[in-house]
């Protein structure tokens, strides 16, 4: 397990991750492996899994996990983030993410 120093997210995607509305991100390359961690502000996130998938499948299966209300919203967001480019037949790496929360442990009395 490694700590990723630079896992880039646009400001609005950081907000969605921190608010719990987004728990996946699709990238053209794998940014890490399951178990790796990264920070957004002072919060820690862990990569739970990384799976290669076609963009068309990501759109239909994971739009909610990407923080969108429906597939059309996901397509619009994707085009906005990728200079209008949309290739549903291209493979991307879907990173499944978990927000790591410290829960204090108290031993039973």
Image: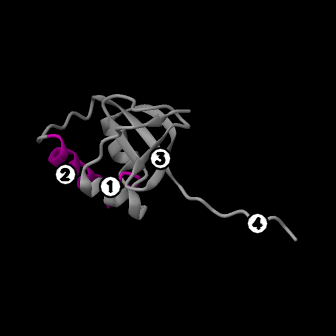
User: Disc 3 to disc 4, how far (Cα)?
Assistant: 27 Å
Quickly name the residue at label 1.
14
For the residue labelled by badge 1, is the local secondary structure a helix, a strand or a loop? Answer: helix
State which tag comes first along the sequence, 4 or 1: 1
User: In this orientation, which residue lies closer to the viewer: 100 or 56?
Assistant: 100
Residue at the left extreme of this rendering: 84
Crowd around label 3: few <14 · some 14–19 · many ≥20 (10 Å)? many
Question: x%, y% of residue 16?
Answer: 34, 59
**In the image: residue 37, left or right of residue 94:** right
Quickly name the residue at label 2.
76
For the residue labelled by badge 2, is the local secondary structure a helix, a strand or a loop? Answer: helix
20 over 79 or under it: above or below? below
- Nearer the observer: mark 3 or 1; the answer is 1
**In the image: residue 7, left or right of residue 50:** left
Q: Kindly indicate whether the residue at mark 1 contacts the one at mark 4 (C-beta within 8 angstroms).
A: no
Instruction: Read off the magenta span.
Output: 64-82
For the residue labelled by badge 4, is the local secondary structure a helix, a strand or a loop? Answer: loop
Q: Kindly indicate whether the residue at mark 2 contacts the one at mark 3 (C-beta within 8 angstroms).
A: no
State which tag comes first along the sequence, 2 or 1: 1
User: Disc 3 to disc 1, how far (Cα)?
Assistant: 12 Å
- Nearer the observer: mark 4 or 1; the answer is 4
Magenta-span inclusion, residue 104: no
User: Disc 3 to disc 2, how far (Cα)?
Assistant: 22 Å
Tell me the residue at 32%/55% (across/down): 14
For the residue labelled by badge 3, is the local secondary structure a helix, a strand or a loop? Answer: strand
């Amino acid at each position: 397990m490694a700590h990723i120093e630079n896992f880039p997210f646009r400001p609005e995607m950081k907000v969605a991750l921190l608010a719990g509305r987004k728990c996946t991100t699709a990238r053209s390359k794998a940014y890490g492996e399951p178990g790796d961690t990264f920070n957004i502000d002072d919060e820690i996130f862990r990569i739970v899994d990384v799976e290669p998938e076609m963009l068309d499948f990501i759109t239909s299966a994971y739009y909610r996990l990407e923080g969108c209300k429906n597939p059309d919203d996901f397509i619009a967001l994707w085009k906005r983030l990728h200079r209008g480019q949309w290739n549903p037949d291209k493979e991307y790496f879907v990173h499944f993410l978990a927000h790591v929360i410290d829960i204090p442990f108290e031993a039973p009395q």
